[in-house]
Every structure is written in structure tokens, then in C-alpha cells.
Image (cartoon, rainbow, N blue to C red):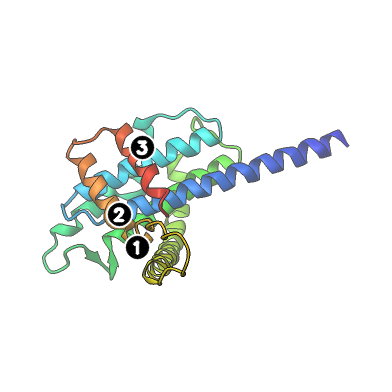
Amino acid sequence: MIDYFLYKLKEQMSNGNREKAEKVIQSSVIWSMGAGLIPIPVADMVAVTAIQIDMLKQISTIYGQDFSEASFKNWIGTLTGSALSGAIKFIPGIGSLIGGVSMAALAGSSTYAVGQVFLSHFEAGGTLADFEVERFKDFYEKQFERGKNFVKDLQRDLDKRGSTAEKAAEAPAPEKTQPAKSTSQPEKDVLARLKDLSELLERGLITQDEFKTLKERILQDI
């Protein structure tokens, strides 16, 4: 009986960690999509990598794991082939598109896949000490394909919520009531704001801590 209760308690804790980690992944996907809009070759993927590293730090903390930024950077590079992705904009006639998928969507899908790799590893009881990146290459590719649909659904949801916010802002205020407070920035503008903030980080105009703080403030508007 005691073993059963311990099992259920562990299961509940695991579900709680997964839910928290999934929220971190979704937030990071939005940020990566914004960073993917930076119109500078290679710089976009540098910003995306920084976002992915921050995501993995947060997920590691949720699961009580120590983290190494250097290890994360190496693992991400192995999984994503970021150098190839960053060079796409050099190809004449293609610009920021590859196979009909924009860099923003590519960045978001990659971030989703990276997050799912480590979420799966931690959920299986793994640690950073026993993580073997080669074992997860195929899993990453599968999650990357799933990430494309995740990004589409996320973009559709943001656009829908942004449209609803715009309509609410344009609707006439009810009579004999206090003037309505101004609405927050429509959600569909979030990616543009993330792009601007990512550029500031890339240019060294803000620190990583300032970047994280401003990121949280923008996400509160969603």
C-alpha cells in the first residue's frame, strides 16, 4: 500500500514537472519565431541558440538537474545543424525560405524539438550526466516535424487572439460606464516585439538578464 502511494505521488510530481516544462517550451518557441525574423544571416540562429539554451536551463531547474551552458551549446549544435540553417539566407533566390518554410517557422520547430528531447530524457529518469546526444538524433527529427504543426497551431492561435483583442478595442464603450482601459498590445504583434528585443541582445545593447526580464514582461501581454 505504501509503495502504491509513493508511486502515485511520484506520478503526480512528474505530471506537474511536465506541465511546467511544456509551458517553458511553448514560450521559447514564440521567442524563437521572433528571433527567426531577424534579417541578418547567421545572427538569427545565434539568437535562437541563446533562447534554446535558456529554455534548457529552465527545464533542467524544473527537474532538479545541474546544467552546463557549454554542454547545451554543443548538444544543440549536434541536434540542429545550426551552421547550415544559418547559411540559408546566403542562397540567392531563396532568401529566408527553404522548402516553403520560413526561418521563423524553422526556428520555432527546432526549439520545440530540442525542448521535447530533453523533456523526454528527464521524464524517463535521465540526467545530464548520462545524456547521449547521438541517441536522440532520430527523435529530434521526428519532433521537428511535429514542431512544424505546433508552430502553425500556435501562430493561428496568436492571430486569432490578436484579432479578438483588436475587435474588443474597436467596439464602442457601453453607455454610463467608466471609460474602458486601453487594451494591451495585440498578440499578433508579439513576434515583432521579440524580433526587436533579440536584435538588441545580439548587438550587445542589453544583457542576458535584461533580455530575460523584458521577455517575461512581453509574455505577460499574451
Q: Is 156 situated above or below 34?
A: below
Q: Given this view, does label 3 or label 2 mark the residue nearer the observer?
A: 3
**Residue 211 horizontal/vertical position (percent):** 30, 38
Real-space Cα separation, disc 3 to disc 2, in angstroms: 16 Å
For residue 171, say whether it is visible.
yes
First in sequence: mark 3 vs mark 2: 2
Cβ–Cβ under 8 Å for marks 1 and 3: no
Name the one closer to the observer, 211 or 38.
Answer: 211
Q: Write the residue at 85% across / 33% down.
A: 2
Q: Residues within 10 Å of mark 3 (few under 14, many from 20)?
A: few
Q: Residue lying at the far right in this picture: please name it.
A: 1
Q: Is 108 situated above or below 165?
A: above
Q: Given this view, does label 2 or label 1 mark the residue nearer the observer?
A: 1
Q: Indicate the quadrant where residue 67 lies.
A: top left
First in sequence: mark 1 vs mark 3: 1
SS of the residue under disc 3: helix
Circle 2 residue: 34
| Amino acid identity at mark 3 | Thr
For residue 131, say whether it is visible.
no
SS of the residue under disc 2: helix
Q: Residues within 10 Å of mark 2 (few under 14, many from 20)?
A: many
**Residue 110 horizontal/vertical position (percent):** 37, 54
Name the one closer to the observer, 47 or 98.
Answer: 47
Circle 1 residue: 188
| Amino acid identity at mark 2 | Gly
**Marker disc for residue 213:** 3
